[in-house]
Image (spheres, helix red, strand yellow):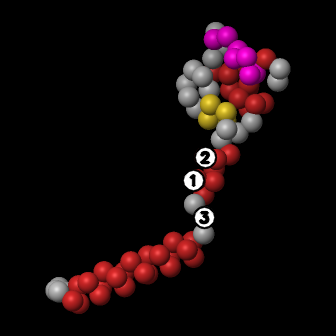
Amino acid sequence: MARGHQKIQSQQKNAEKKKKMEKAQGHDQKKAASKALIYTCTVCKSQMPDPKTYKQHFESKHPKAELPAELQSV
């Protein structure tokens, strides 16, 4: 087990290695996907990418609930 100065050097080396791994990996797919999900259902709070999908979801999952104003024109 490393102690003192050797431990600090090891931690710094590991931190640099992690930074390089993250940079090589590229962008995070979860973040990119969450940005694409714009519309949020008013009843169940699930997210959809476009109004057409949102309307289909609303009609199939919440048939008794009134259609939101943003979906009236779609």
Q: Residues within 10 Å of mark 1 (few under 14, many from 20)?
A: few
Q: Position of residue 38 (x, y in %)?
A: 67, 38
- Is 12 above or below relative to 23? below
Amino acid type, residue under disc 3 in the picture: His
* Residue occupying image coordinates x 16% and y 86%: 3
The residue nearer to you, when weighing 49 against 61, is 49
- Is 38 above or below relative to 65? below
The residue nearer to you, when weighing 5 against 60, is 5
Mark 1 and 2 residues: CB-CB less than 8 Å, in contact? yes
Asked if the magenta segment contains residue 52, the reply would be no
Mark 1 and 3 residues: CB-CB less than 8 Å, in contact? no
Q: Which residue is mark 2?
A: 34
Residue 30's disc is 1
Question: In the drawing, does residue 32 fall left or right of residue 18?
Answer: right
Q: Judging from the image, what secondary structure is the residue with disc 1 in? A: helix
Q: Residues within 10 Å of mark 2 (few under 14, many from 20)?
A: few
Q: Quadrant of the image for the N terminus? A: bottom left
Q: Judging from the image, what secondary structure is the residue with disc 3 in? A: loop
Identify the magenta region. Answer: 65-71
